[in-house]
Amino acid sequence: MARRSVANCDICEKLGEYIYIKNDVGEKLPEAAGMLKEVAGEVLGAVVYKCPHCGTFYTYSRETDNEPGLSFDVTEMKRVGRDEAKKIIDSEKRYAKKYKQKKLKELEKSISTLEASERSVVLYLVETLGKGKCQPVIENDLNIGGPEAGAIFASLVKKGILEKKIVYPLKAEKDECRQESERYTKDNVFFNIKPVI
Ligand SMILES: [Zn+2]
């Protein structure tokens, strides 16, 4: 069977070349967007998705502001060529490699003194390339929880390896927690490797 092209792709036909939606008035991305596969994260400012059926690339960006009276929340999704997508993916790979090498070197001494469970949290957070994660996501991904998890995080914060932040999940997307300075809930705790870049 011939490889599907964007012209006869059932996912891409529902997305089109360009999507701009206002999330704050309840507009939503077409359901087909959920079928795309993330191939570059948000590290360098652009998320790149790839269509699993035809290989077409899309960039995704979301901008929010919660200033009273000036609040907005918009998402832009754009079909991009293979070269443009590859450029973003490659630069992210280079960045990731450099970041991890530098961070692991920085942490070398302290990592060797950690308990295995603490070390796994630190190595996991290094993989987020300085973005950090919400506590429930870390617990779920590493299969830890309860008092045990609490003790690990507390110990790493005390040792000055992790930074703890309280965040307010603006939109309850799977691993997305957005910092919000005024309205936070005590259960939303976010951890990142120090120093935060
Ligand atoms: Zn497609």
Image (cartoon, grey):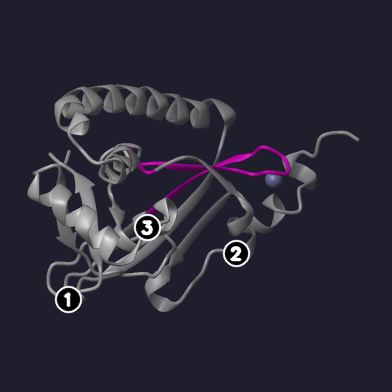
| Picture quadrant of residue 107 | top left
Where does the image place residue 117, in percent across and percent down from the top left? Answer: 30, 46
Residue pointed to by mark 2 = 30
Q: Could you tell me the amino acid type at mark 2?
A: Pro
Residue pointed to by mark 1 = 183
Residue pointed to by mark 3 = 144
Does mark 2's beta carbon lie closer than 8 Å to ligand 1? no
| Picture quadrant of residue 175 | bottom left
Q: In screen coordinates, is 63 left or right of 86? A: left
Q: Distance between the residues labelled 3 and 2?
A: 35 Å
Density class for disc 2 (Cα within 10 Å; few <14, some 14-19, many ≥20) is: few
Mark 3 vs 2, N-terminal side: 2
134 vs 84, nearest the viewer: 134
Q: At 30% across and 43% down in the image, what residue appears? A: 125
Asked whether residue 25 is drawn in magenta, I would say: no
| Picture quadrant of residue 176 | bottom left
- State the extent of the magenta-drawn residues as a range: 42-62
Q: Is residue 172 above or below residue 45?
A: below
